[in-house]
Amino acid sequence: MGLIVLLVVGGLIGWVASLIMRTDGQQGIFLNIVVGIVGAALAGFLITPLIGGAPITTGVISIQSVLVSLVGAVALLAIINLFRRGTVR
């Protein structure tokens, strides 16, 4: 059940991040899920130890973990855009 919740929340986080970065038209649902989960893992390893709390990849879903995961997904999309287009946008 935890995996299904992670996929759904990761997909939602990836979708919101793609809306923020204006890449929604280029991505499908699969890429939204991948960006959400990888961004959550990235933020879980880098940001969560600095501010405390539990990352969303451990199954703990709170406002703090969702916002940190969203920041990680937006940062991941910015890095991808930087390499793909040469601009963060």
Image: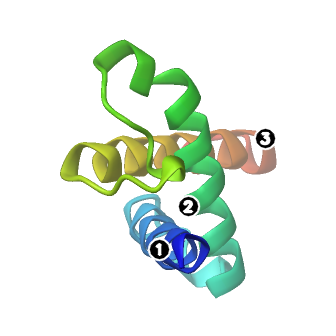
Q: Residues within 10 Å of mark 2 (few under 14, many from 20)?
A: many
Label 3 sits on residue: 83
Label 1 sits on residue: 15
Q: Earlier in the sequence, mark 1 or mark 3?
A: 1
In this rendering, does residue 14 appear at all?
Answer: yes
Residue at horizontal 66%, vertical 78%?
26
Mark 1, secondary structure of its residue: helix
Residue at horizontal 31%, vertical 22%?
52
Name the amino acid, label 2.
Gly
Residue found at the very far front of the displayed protein: 1
Q: Nearer the viewer, mark 1 or mark 3?
A: 1
> Residue 81 placed where, x, y %?
67, 49
Q: Earlier in the sequence, mark 3 or mark 2?
A: 2
In this rendering, does residue 73 appear at all?
Answer: no
Residue at horizontal 46%, vertical 58%?
21
Q: Residues within 10 Å of mark 3 (few under 14, many from 20)?
A: few
> Residue 83 placed where, x, y %?
78, 41
Name the amino acid, label 3.
Phe
Q: Report, in whole angstroms, how far the alpha carbon at label 1 lies from the one at label 3.
A: 20 Å
Which residue is more in the foreground, 54 or 28?
54
Label 2 sits on residue: 36
Q: Report, in whole angstroms, how far the alpha carbon at label 1 lies from the one at label 2.
A: 8 Å
> Residue 75 placed where, x, y %?
52, 40
Name the amino acid, label 1.
Trp
Contact, mark 1 vs mark 2 (Cβ under 8 Å): yes
